[in-house]
């Protein structure tokens, strides 16, 4: 039976293409070392891109309201104030901290913090007796001005998990604080003078030792950010500075209770 030349040629071409395909496959394996299988259950994964490790640092920002108190000392020789109390309006508290963990998963970290608190003077009270004019004596009233406090503190913090997304943080710290207090419009109530007699005020500024304690409750927003609520108490030793010769009493120890929101960013 005669062989069809057309069929023979077609078969030959298919055989050549099959051989060339095998050669190409073998060459690809030899050059790349990779083997591609038609089985969908077997896949070749690309090398994973290495992740950049975080530096371990965190930035913390606290913002809220501050309640301030101050203890005062007696006046200078030309006048005498006693039992002086200064009341402040609720003020603004803004703090910034940068910290470093002490170990990968210990929960402990150290932090350096600074910021500013501002409180306006609401009123002043106490007793007054003039050394120059014994007839001038009475109850102290009035008062206006502002209190500025700038701390620079080192904190030791400990955090532990309450749930997968919630943590509780505790801190204690100490350092220094610069304070500046201006009190004006201080008057003595005297029946002979309606509205009282203006007797001066104080301008006290300087550095003092500061200590503080606080806690916060935070929720994770992402792997590197969190948002929460915080409360912090801070106090100082006696102010190292005090008033000039024109002042009538000195501000000494300050106490603060701040509360608000806290935001943390790890990087």
Image (cartoon, helix red, strand yellow):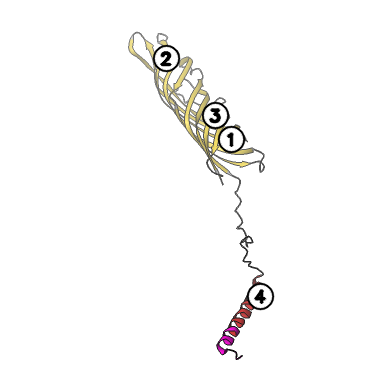
Place residue 133 in its image quadrant.
top left
Q: For the magenta stretch, what is the residue range?
A: 1-11
Residue name at image x 59 percent, y 33 percent: 168
Q: Quick one: 219 or 135, which is closer to the camera?
A: 219
Q: Nearer the viewer, mark 4 or mark 1?
A: 4
N-terminal of the two: label 4 or label 2?
4
Task: Based on the picture, tell me whether residue 51 belongs to the magenta stretch.
Answer: no
In this figure, which residue is indicated by the disc labeled 4?
Answer: 26
Q: Quick one: 100 or 130, which is closer to the camera?
A: 100
Q: Is any atom of residue 193 visible in this view?
A: yes
Q: Marks 4 and 1, how far apart in space?
A: 58 Å
N-terminal of the two: label 3 or label 1?
1
Place residue 192 in its image quadrant.
top left
Q: Main secondary structure of the magenta part?
A: helix
Q: What numbered label is drawn on residue 167?
A: 1
Q: Nearer the viewer, mark 4 or mark 2?
A: 4
Image position of 133 (left or right of 18): left
N-terminal of the two: label 2 or label 1?
2
Whether the residues at callouts 3 and 2 have beta carbons within 8 Å, the answer is: no
In this figure, which residue is indicated by the disc labeled 2?
Answer: 140
Number of residues whose C-alpha sits closer than 10 Å to that of mark 3, classed few (under 14), some (14–19) or many (20 or more):
some
């Amino acid at each position: 039976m005669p062989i069809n030349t057309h069929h023979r040629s077609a078969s030959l071409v298919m055989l050549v293409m099959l051989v060339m395909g095998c050669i190409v496959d073998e060459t690809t394996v030899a050059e790349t070392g990779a083997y591609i299988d038609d089985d969908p259950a077997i896949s070749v994964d690309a090398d994973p891109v290495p992740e950049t490790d975080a530096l371990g640092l965190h930035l913390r920002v606290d913002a809220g309201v501050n309640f301030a108190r101050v203890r005062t000392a007696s006046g200078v020789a030309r006048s005498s104030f006693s039992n002086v109390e200064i009341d402040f309006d609720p003020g603004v508290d803004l703090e910034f901290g940068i910290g470093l963990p002490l170990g990968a998963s210990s929960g402990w970290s150290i932090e350096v913090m600074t910021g500013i608190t501002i409180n306006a003077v609401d009123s002043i009270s106490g007793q007054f007796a003039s050394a120059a004019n014994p007839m001038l004596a009475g109850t102290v009233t009035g008062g206006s001005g502002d209190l500025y406090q700038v701390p620079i503190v080192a904190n030791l913090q400990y955090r532990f998990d309450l749930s997968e997304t919630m943590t509780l943080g505790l801190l204690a710290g100490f350092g220094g604080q610069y304070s500046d207090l201006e009190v004006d419009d201080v008057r003595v109530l005297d029946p002979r003078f309606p509205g009282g007699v203006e007797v001066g005020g104080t301008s006290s500024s300087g550095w003092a030792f500061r200590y503080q304690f606080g806690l916060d409750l935070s929720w994770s927003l992402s792997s590197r950010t969190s948002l929460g609520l915080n409360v912090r108490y801070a106090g100082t030793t006696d102010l190292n500075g005090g008033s000039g010769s024109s002042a009538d009493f000195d501000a000494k120890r300050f106490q603060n209770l701040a509360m608000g929101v806290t935001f943390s960013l790890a990087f």
